[in-house]
């Protein structure tokens, strides 16, 4: 069993990923390295988050454009991983809030470090 399959089973994921994105044929589960491969992160259940392909694309964009938001989302993904439970509604709300701040910043060209009150 792969690390991805193990995490899906441990966290009882079916219809939604760690970030709350719906799973579909086009946007399937993918493995996100919480600690990047470039920084020595391995593909293990202790260093992973299960997110959909769409969530992964969005997270990569956020990382390129607003590293502070990326780091906060990644902290929540680590929190979910360490819980060994299905993501909670509160964790999904926190992620959704950060995604909304990111979207607003793209629309308004704000500096997110001044916007975040988390």
Image (tube, helix red, strand yellow):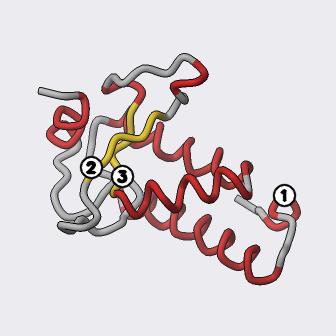
Q: Residue at x 36, y 57 (%)?
A: 53
Q: Which residue is mark 2?
A: 86
**Which residue position holds label 3?**
51
- In this rendering, would 110 be left or right of 29? right
Q: Position of residue 7 (x, y in %)?
A: 24, 36
Figure quadrant of the C terminus: bottom right
Secondary structure under badge 2? loop
- Residue 113, labelled with which disc? 1
Q: Nearer the viewer, residue 7 or 60?
A: 60
Q: CA distance from mark 3 to mark 1?
A: 25 Å
N-term-proximal mark, 3 vs 1:
3
In percent of the image, x 67 and y 69: which residue is there?
102
Q: CA distance from mark 1 to mark 2?
A: 30 Å
61 left or right of 34 in image? right
Say which of 15 and 54 sits in front. 54
Of circles 1 and 2, the one toward us is 1
Identify the element where label 3 is drawn: strand
């Amino acid at each position: 069993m792969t690390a991805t399959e193990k995490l899906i089973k441990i966290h009882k994921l079916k219809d939604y990923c760690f970030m709350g994105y719906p799973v579909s044929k086009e946007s399937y589960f993918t493995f996100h390295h919480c600690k990047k491969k470039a920084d020595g992160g391995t593909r293990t259940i202790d260093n992973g988050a299960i997110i959909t392909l769409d969530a992964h694309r969005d997270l990569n964009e956020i990382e390129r454009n607003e590293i502070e938001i990326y780091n906060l989302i990644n902290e929540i993904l680590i929190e979910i991983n360490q819980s060994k439970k299905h993501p909670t509604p509160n964790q999904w709300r926190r992620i959704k809030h950060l995604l909304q701040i990111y979207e607003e910043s793209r629309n308004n060209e704000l500096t997110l470090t001044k916007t975040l009150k988390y």
